[in-house]
Amino acid sequence: MAETDTATAVSAPAPLTRGKRKERLGEVISNKMAKTIVVRVERRFPHPKFKKVVTGYKKFYAHDESSQAKVGDRVRIEETRPLSKTKRWRLVEVVTRSSGVAPVAV
């Protein structure tokens, strides 16, 4: 009997990735804490009983390492490991900058 060489294909190890993480798009409503922003995410859904489209909001605390987000900016945040008691999100990018003009109260 002849020996047959069976070459096993050795593949490179898969690169380390973060996996599929939740992303949200929202508006910065506060940046007064050190390296932390508060992002308000809007959610529109039909009311279960009345079927009218209602708007719900939820606040997320996100980590902003370089303090680049300002109040009013539209930002994209991504789920991450717990960084503190309430902070489980991190800033991915600033999508649009705010105009920087504060509304005047009449």
Image: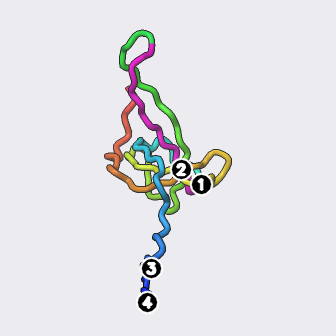
Q: Helix or strand or loop: what does disc 1 sit on? A: loop
Is the Cβ of the residue at disc 1 closer than 8 Å to that at disc 3?
no
Q: Where is mark 1, residue-wise?
A: 81
Does the magenta-highlighted stretch encompass residue 71? no
74, 42: nearer the viewer: 42
**Whole-Å distance between the Cαs marked 4 and 1?**
56 Å
Query: What residue is shown at x 48% (from left), y 51% (from top)?
Result: 21
In this rendering, the answer to whether 20 lies above or below 39 is: below
Query: Mark 4 or mark 1: which comes first in sequence?
Result: 4
Mark 4 vs 3: CB contact within 8 A: no
Please tell me whether mark 3 sits on a helix, a strand or a loop.
loop
Quick one: 28 or 22, which is closer to the camera?
Answer: 22
Taking 69 as reference, is 17 above or below it? below
Asked if residue 25 lies left or right of residue 16, the reply is: left
Q: Position of residue 9 (x, y in %)?
A: 42, 78
Identify the residue under disc 4.
Answer: 2
Q: Residues within 10 Å of mark 1 (few under 14, many from 20)?
A: few
Region of the chain picked out in magenta, as a range:
34-48
Q: Nearer the viewer, mark 1 or mark 2?
A: 1
Calculate the distance from the C-alpha at mark 1 to the C-alpha at mark 3.
38 Å
**How many numbered marks appear?**
4
What kind of residue is marked 4? Ala
- Label 2: which secondary element: strand
**In the figure, is residue 65 to the left or right of 74?**
right
Query: In the depicted view, which residue is nearer to us: 14 or 104?
Result: 14
- In whole angstroms, how far apart are the C-alphas of marks 1 and 2? 8 Å
Q: Which residue is mark 3?
A: 8
Q: Residue at x 47, y 30 (%)?
A: 57
Label pair 2/4, CB-CB below 8 angstroms: no
Q: Which mark is residue 89?
A: 2
